[in-house]
Amino acid sequence: MGIARTNLKGVTHYVHSNAYNGYTLFTPLGIRETMLIDMKGRVVHQWKVPYPPALYGVLLNSGNLLYAGQLENGPLASFKGAGGELLEVDWNGNVVWNYQDRYLHHSFCRLFNGNTMVLRWVQVPKDIAAKVKGGILGTEKEGIMWGDSFQEVNPRGKIVWKWLAYEHLDPEKDIICSLCPRSQWTEANSFAILSNGDILASFARLNSICIISKSTGDIKWRWGSGGELGHQNSATILENGNILLFDNGTHCVHISEGYSRVLEVNPATNKMVWEYKDDPWMAFYSAYMSSCQRLPNDNTLICEAATGRIFEVMKSGRIVWEFVNPFSASSDPVYGHNRIIPRAYRYGPEHEGLQDMKGKFT
């Protein structure tokens, strides 16, 4: 159930009785500030950071912001999601921890043990790259195909665990989308950590989400490459064991025109148990980035990155809150003038990271 689109910015729709009350965190693409807004769209706090965003930041239980910044002139700066600098900043914007690796990209996660899981690009060995199927012929980056690696980093910056995608994927089966270049095999764009330490990963160019065993490195489960997905994002695990993800619908095979959906999938049955799409379906579409989050009241917060639109829907599909980004950026080298919000997160008043901060709201 959609609502009428307007040219208004800020909060354009709010059903108090059905929305999940809290604060929404987002970082506009190309702007060196992360915003925390209330349900009326008022900025209650903002962090000024020294780097433009690779994509986003998250609020930690300490009240600090963990933020991925983009280094200038990185070796793979032309790749989407390029980062290089991971920062933890306190409420006043002071850097309390950082980790730099020029090949960091897209996603990160602070673990319960205090370590941080990061995602980085690595070169695929030429003998393996030659066997990888799919993609546009001759489009490797300067003759190199890049893949993904997960690395667990301790607070001192030491790598204590890593996983290399090319050691566990199958060049015959893990096929690059035929409309994508061969510069990247997998293009991992998000991941989540399961309660047992396993990793739920989204491999966009494979149109697949996978569960990776932390102990063995083996891929225990995969779904999406049978035509269900189109360069998806933001795969997360729910309390019921199901998986929530944003299906961007780019280069999808189930319909000729692109449109986006948010899906809940039961990994035990490989069945979709819930779906959000607009009516008409083409009214909801972001070809890139975007996110989704299941809220404590069973609603879902959706970030439609391309339009800079964040909205909350009930299980019925009814929209009960909508915010359109009023902050524009004009300096992004890829997207130019835009109002893009790559990801958004809602935190309830009870969130541990907000307990000592509410009196400091601006």
Image (cartoon, helix red, strand yellow):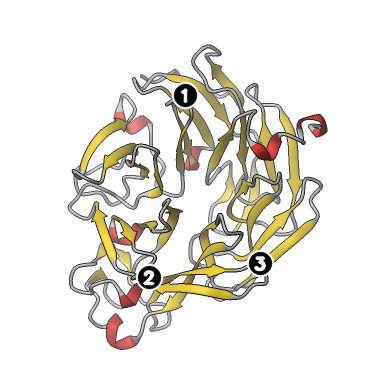
Query: Would residue 5 be found to the left or right of residue 166 on screen?
Result: right
N-terminal of the pair, mark 1 or mark 2, is 2
Camera-nearest residue between 304 and 294: 294
Report the residue at 71% width, 44% height from top.
63
Amino acid type, label 3: Pro
Amino acid type, label 1: Asn
- What percent of the width, then of the height, locates residue 80? 48, 61
- What percent of the width, then of the height, locates residue 104? 55, 68
Q: Nearer the viewer, mark 1 or mark 2?
A: 1
Labelled disc at residue 184:
2
- What percent of the width, then of the height, locates residue 273? 25, 33
Vertical placement of 245 versus 130: above or below? above
Vertical placement of 75 versus 213: above or below? below
Kindly state the secondary structure of the residue where label 2 is placed: loop
Labelled disc at residue 297:
1
Residue at the spot of label 3: 155
Kindly state the secondary structure of the residue where label 3 is placed: loop
Amino acid type, label 2: Gln
Q: CA distance from mark 1 to mark 2?
A: 38 Å
Report the residue at 79% width, 51% height from top.
93
- What percent of the width, then of the height, locates residue 303? 49, 37
> Quadrant where the N terminus lies?
top left
